[in-house]
Each structure stands twice: as structure tokens, then as C-alpha cells.
Image (cartoon, helix red, strand yellow):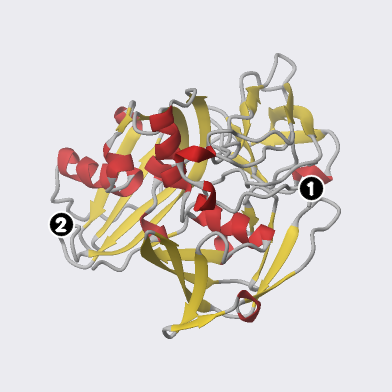
Amino acid sequence: MRNAKLIVCLWLLLSGISNIQAQKVFGRVVDASSEEPLVGVSVYFDGSRFGTTTSEDGSFEIETPYTILSSLIFSHIGYETLELEEYYKEGSLWIKLKAKTEVLDEVVVTSDPFSRRQKMEVFRLEFLGDDRYGRHCEILNEEVISLYFDSSTNMLTASATAPIMVRNDYLSSLSEFDLQEFEVYFKSRSLVRLENVFFTYLSGFSRFIDNDPESKRISRRRFKAYLGSPMHLMRSIYRNQLTENGFRFRKEYETFPSHKIFQRFDPDSLKLVEIQFLQDDFDLTFSYGLDYESALRILGDRSIKIDPYGTHRPYKNIVFRKYMSGMRTGRLLPIDYMPPGTFNPQGSVRSDHHLWGKDALNISDPSK
């Protein structure tokens, strides 16, 4: 079994929350050097369908039905992508984008023994996922992707000159992924993945362009993609409903109650929950018919904040391993995804929870 680790931002909607404050973000985007307004800049919340483009004077405005912690992303051809985290603490935003510059570093030539076809095959599996979700995805613009295998380190890297467009026929969605970093470390000078992948690192920003209406089949598939995911875990921590939702923590084969793993503080004025972890490493089991084993490593100051929809910050403070580390972009769902039988922010409930049975999720009135 390979020992793979993955840090990746994936954002979803928390079940069972109502009465969340609406959110409006607005401002202007200009060139950092000339301060001239930039037209057509993509402005969006990471992992969502909420976004817009700047007008002729560089202005933008986005309104969402609830407050979220997802980063606000500014992306424009020829400019460095900007990630803004604590935008909700500001009023009108004045954003300066820096033009990309070509830095000509000293080049150390190492042989790349593999063809683009061979490297692209590995990229698809590691980027989209080597499961039913990933295998039903198609990258629509592979020409924007550059790949390189460094024989001196046995590392495959990838970069992209534009957001990667992904059509997911299994979950019936179309999304784009602004790739920031992609590295796969192999144990040997080979692209064989079985027992040979030591470490995978993938980071970037995602935006959903289209998310087709759900049929019963698509609803089942999206729900299964959600179950046991990092976002399902974060929502369960937020609601203090880990056991009800099938999660349990372990340390050296012994099950521990959550209060021995972390300290949970009540929501603040922005309805954010602070979590202070008491352990650096622990195992996690998610049970849904079968047991799915994951492991978490906590970095930094052991502290994160979670919003009502499962977004946590700083996201780099948690490394997911084992089962959760294998979840790639093929399993991405937008932050406004609502599992069957759960309450949305407006208080209405999806009526198709009979597809799963009432015990599939902890279904409760969010006002209680």
C-alpha cells in the first residue's frame, strides 16, 4: 500500500444550519503598477459557484446567502492569482494584481526519460483520482498543462498556463481548477504508481461553472462522494456530531472521545467555531457499511476555525492521509451542496432523504 499524503482545499455545505447571515463583497481591481482598472478579472469564492467578473471600471460585487470562510480568489490572464482570506473583516476592497514576470533562473539540465503521454496518464490519475469519480472525468484543455519528471529527485511536477477545465460526467458538473502546485514523489525512477508513490502534493483553487440539476442517480452519487470526506468531517466537528455521523478517533488502536483529541469552543459572532487540537497525530475511522481508515496530522499552532459549511482555516494546518488523501478533484462538490434530508440556509428541507434512509445523516431541526 502506498504512503500518500495530500493537502487539498475542498469546500462543501454543512448540513443542518439555518439563520446564517447573508454576505456581500464588493470593491475594485487595479493593476499594481499603474493602478489602472482591470476589466474581466475573475472574482470568486474558492470551491463555489459564487463569482463574477470585473466591469470596465474594475468594480465587482458578489452576494451570497450566507457567510463563508472560503478564500476570495482574483484571477486574470497575465497576472498572478491572488488569494484573499479575511475579506469579511473589510468594507470595500481595493485589490492590486501584480503582472506575472518571467524569472530566468540558472537551469540545471536533468534528463526526462518519459513521454508526455506517459506523464499525462499519471497526472490524470493523481489529479482527478484513481476511482470511479476520477475515471469519469475529462480534462477539456490538456494543452495548458506542462509536465516534467526530474530524474535526480524522482519527482513529477505540473503547471498550467490557464485554469484546468474538468467535466465530471459521474457527478454531472463542470468546474475549473487554478493549479498552484502539483508534485508527485516516486520512490524510484519510474512512473509506476503501485507501491511507488511516496508523496503527492496538490494545491489550487476551484470554481464550479455548471452543476446540473440532480436526478435520483446523480443525487446518490453526489451523496456518496460527500460521505466520509474531509468536509463531512469538518461539518460534523462544527455540529459536535461526530459519533452520530459515523466518525470516531483512534490512537494506537484505542478509541478516544473527541474531547481528548480537541477542544471545541462555541461559535463566535460570525458563527465560526474554534478548534484547538490536543494531539499532533491520530487515526480516524468513518463507518458506513464498511470502515474507512484515515489519519490526520496537525501542523502549526494546532488551532483552526470552521464555518457552518465545513470550511476550515488555516487549511494547511491539517494533513489528511490514507483514505481521505486519495480524494482528488473528481470528488469535488460545490460549497452549496446539500445532502438529501438536510436543512438548507433558508430552513427548507430536501424531501428525498428516503433514498438513503433516515440514519444516513443526522437529520435534525437546525433551530434546536
Quarter that holds the N terminus: bottom left
Residue at (35% x, 55% y) in the render: 183
Residue at (51% x, 25% y) in the render: 209
Residue that carries the numbered disc 2 in the rendered image: 192
- Tell me which label, 2 or 1, sits earlier in the chain: 2
Work out whether 57 lies above or below 131.
above
Q: Left or right: 71 with respect to 190?
A: right
Q: Secondary structure at mark 1?
A: loop
Where residue 30 sits, quadrant-wise, is top right
Residue at (70% x, 13% y) in the render: 56
Where residue 278 sits, quadrant-wise, is bottom right
Residue 266 at x, y = what percent? 79, 64
Name the mark on residue 367. Answer: 1
Is 47 in front, or is 35? 47
Q: Amino acid at mark 2?
A: Val
Work out whether 250 lies above or below 303.
below
